[in-house]
Amino acid sequence: MATATPEQLTEIVRVFAPLMKNRRNRPSAFLTIDLPDFIESRGHISVGDGGQQILIEEYKRRVDQRVLEIVESHPALAALREGREMTDDELIDLEADVTY
């Protein structure tokens, strides 16, 4: 167990007190990136094991729809919206849902 003198503790308070305004309860897991999201909307893309060709616009629509379904209904994201911590099981389920 470490011990400190009152003078040492006072010095620590003097150094760190001005920095406490920058303190967060927990670090954010999200980054904000100010970049446009472009997608080429002409042509075809191969999907699935059989390499089915579909229009990129249709593929994007399907992906967007699936992402919105997950965002609206997934328990891990509901916990995030409510300010609760996500459980390990919820995170594992979320990973499985978005990598399918």
Image (spheres, rainbow, N blue to C red):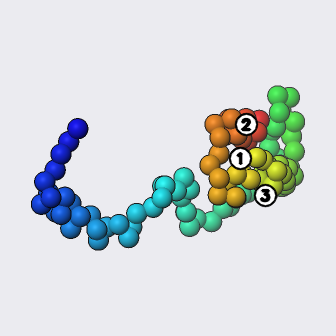
Pointer 3 and pointer 2: residues touching (CB < 8 Å)?
A: no
Question: Is 89 in front, or is 2?
Answer: 2
Q: Secondary structure at mark 2?
A: helix
Pointer 3 and pointer 1: residues touching (CB < 8 Å)?
A: no
Which residue: 16% across, 63% down? 11
Amino acid at circle 3: Ser
Which residue: 73% across, 57% down? 40
Measured from the top left, where is residue 45 in percent x and y? 80, 43
Number of the label disc, if any, that sits on residue 76 = 1
Q: Which residue is mark 2?
A: 93
Amino acid at circle 1: Ala
Measured from the top left, where is residue 56 in percent x and y? 81, 51
Measured from the top left, where is residue 22 in percent x and y? 39, 67
Pointer 2 and pointer 1: residues touching (CB < 8 Å)?
A: yes
Number of the label disc, if any, that sits on residue 90 = none
Measure how far apart labels 2 and 1 are at the Cα level: 8 Å
Q: Is residue 94 visible?
A: yes
- Whichever of labels 2 and 1 marks the residue nearer the N terminus, that label is 1
Measured from the top left, where is residue 52 in percent x and y? 87, 36
Q: Is residue 35 above or below residue 59?
A: below
Q: Which residue is mark 3?
A: 41
Measure how far apart labels 3 and 2 are at the Cα level: 31 Å
Within 10 Å of disc 2 (Cα), the crowding (few <14, some 14-19, many 20+) is some
Seen in the image, is 84 located left or right of residue 28? right
Q: Quadrant of residue 23?
A: bottom left
Please state, as top left, top right, bottom left or bottom right, where the C terminus lies in the image: top right
Q: Is residue 15 visible?
A: no
